[in-house]
Structures are given as structure tokens and as C-alpha cells.
Amino acid sequence: MYAERVLSGMRPTGRLHLGHYHGVLKNWVKLQEEYPCLFFVADWHALTTVYDNPEVITDSVWDMLVDWLAAGVDPEKATIFIQSKVPQHAELHLLLSMISPVGWLERVPTYKDQQEKLAHKDLATYGFLGYPLLMSADILLYRADKVPVGEDQVPHIEFTREIARRFNHLFGREPGFEDKAKEAVKKLGGKTGKLFEELRKRFQQEGETEALEQARLILRDAGSVSHVDLERLHGYLEGSGKMILVEPGALLTEAARMPGLDGQKMSKSYGNTIFLREDPATVTKKIRTMQTDPARVRRTDPGDPEKCPVWQFHAIYSDADTRSWVQQGCRSAGIGCIECKQPVIDGVLKEQVVMHERAQRYLDDPALMRRIVADGCERAAVLAEETMRDVREAMGLSYR
């Protein structure tokens, strides 16, 4: 019914590093060659955790956009925009909040996980509780059927699908839908119909996916019910009436392989990053001072690449011959750690040369970057308004 479309965003909470590049941006560059893509700065999402320090957002937005373009995101192939510049995001978030059970939000797996990780912050706010719903509004607003996420974000996509079903169930029905659906329930038989209603309520009110699956099994085995009534019953159960909001699909991406300078995940909070567009001298110094296998106390001591953070960089930046040279030379003490690090330095610097070149035109002419974003916001707003017209009409809000 709707065209294929990819949507993805990134929160502006500081400088981007190679972890962002290998984990997100390289995938964006690939996707823009295959699908219509919308990439947005999620500045409202950033406020959910840094509401007490909004200067971070102000300082990060434009630098992050330059990093995107430096990484190869092409404004001729993808729509680039800022979330807060398209007010329909807030409008749809508000309207969806009217129908979203609080229990559904509280059960999103990352809710408690993030509270524990950010225990030093006061996150007892609706903004933090409701950020999965804002994410759902972002996706549903553009009827995006493909959302690139890692495995840990799949529950957010399923939550969005459930919100879309609930909205479509409440507002996308045919005239007299509920009465017709209740008549169809009777055709299931007294005992089965009663069980179906109980399961439907458990799913609609409590979000129990097990109840949803049990009810679907009942419909699968309901051989005496007509096809039309089965469609009504599926809509009654899970909201698949008129499709106003499109259920998105998760476009699974590989976990980021980019390690930090200490072998942990690259993160600003660990102080182990190499930033995009970092100056060559700093990059060289950072890699030369990386920790190596602690067993190599002296130059003549053999080592084990598997225990060395530098080896993880070789896995990304070095070819097969170089990796073989490292394995043999390290284990036999035939090469020293400084020698081992040099191909990594060369690989990172070569990658960043292109980024520096792409970024320079936007650094020389900031107005060019702002024009790109203004055009992207305008294109995004057109798509968003198409959805909101249908949403307002369905909810009885398109007054004349």
C-alpha cells in the first residue's frame, strides 16, 4: 500500500567516533543506495537524558551533521533533517499517548536497563518513560517499513508495531465494525468465543503477547467462520483494519565491531575513542600508546594477538596478509608492538583522509549545510503532513 522507506536517527550528545562510523554510518551509506532513506537528528530524544544540560545538544547538532556528510551520507540520495524542525513528530507523539497503555511502556526492556546504567541521573520523568513512544511516532509518521536496528532495539520495533495495531484497531475500522466483530465472535461458539474475548482483552489491556498468539491459534482453527468474518476478528484482536499507520519491520544490522583503544566497546564514557575527523597527530599518538598483550613485557617476549586490543583493530583495518604477519610475528616475538601498530595507524589515517576532504566544503561554507537541512526538513514535513491528515481525520480532529 505504501512505498518502501528507511528511517533512522541519531541523538546529538557529543562528538562522533569510529564506533558510530562502523556501527551506524557505513550502514546508512549502503542503505541510501538501495532504498529511499530519511536520516534525522533526534534532538528531542537527546533531551530525555540530558534535559539538564541542553548545551550538549546545541553544541553537537551541526558538528554531527558534518560528520554524517563526511562519512558519505549523500543529501542527493537521502533526506537529512532535524526532528524538532518537523513539529508533526510532537503532534503524533501526543495523539498516540492518548491510547498507549502505561504498562506497555514500563515493560520495554531498555527502560529499566537504562535507568540502572544512568543511575546518577534523575530519570523519573515522563520524557524518559515515554521515549519509546516518541520513537514510535518518529517511525509511524513516515510510514517507514524498514528501521535499521541492532538486536537490543528489536523490542522497540515490536512496541511500535503494537501501537500501530492498536491505533488501526481503534480508528481504522469500517462503519459498525465492532458490532460486526462481536457477531463474528459468536460464530466461534459459546466457550471458544468467551475464551477469545478474554485473550483479546489481555492483549489489548495488558500487552500479553502470549494471549495474542493463543487467540490467533483459535482463529486459525475456526474453519466454520467466513473469510470476511475472520478478517474482522483479526482486526478486532490486533488492529489490522484500515491501515492508517504502517507496521514497521526491523532491518537487523550487525553489531558494531569497532573496539575502543582499551579493547572495550568504543565509548566517550570510557575515554577510549578515536573521533571522526580527528587530527592525524592525535590519532597516531592514541594508537601508539594503546595497551598491548601484558605478557609482552620485553621486546623479546612472545605475545598472543587474541589478548591484545590492537589485534581487534587489525581485524577491521588490515588485509589477510598483514593479519598473518601480525599473528606470526607477535607469537614468535619477531615484531615489536610499535611495528604491529603501524599498519593500524596507516589504515585509520587513510580512512579519515576522505572524511576530512568531504567535511572541508561544509566547514568552509556553513550556509551550505544549513540549506541541506532546510531542504530536508521541508521534504520530511510534506511526508509527515500526509500521515497526520489521515490521523486527524481518523481521530475526528479534522474540523471544517
Image: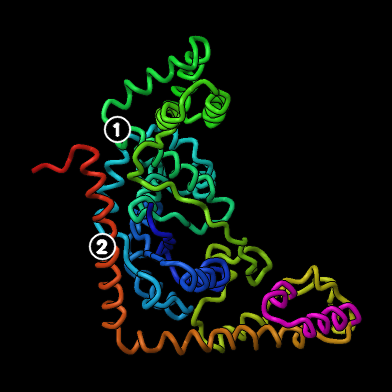
Asked if the residue at tag 2 contacts the one at tag 1, i.e. Cβ–Cβ closer than 8 Å, the answer is: no
Which range of residues does the magenta coloring cover?
311-332
Q: From this view, report whether residue 216 is shown above or below residue 61.
A: above
Across and down, in percent, residue 191 comes to 52, 10
Across and down, in percent, residue 395 comes to 23, 38
Residue at the image position 26 percent from the left and 82 percent from the top: 367
- The one nearer the camera, 109 or 92, is 92
Query: As drawn, is 319 to the left or to the right of 83?
Result: right
Location of residue 223 by image quarter? top right
Count all numbered tags in the image, as a single digit: 2
Q: Residue type at mark 1: give it.
A: Glu
- The one nearer the camera, 45 or 279, is 45
Does residue 331 show up magenta in the picture?
Answer: yes
Query: As drawn, is 25 to the left or to the right of 85?
Result: right
Q: Which residue is denoted by mark 2 in the rendering?
A: 85
Q: Which residue is denoted by mark 1 in the rendering?
A: 174
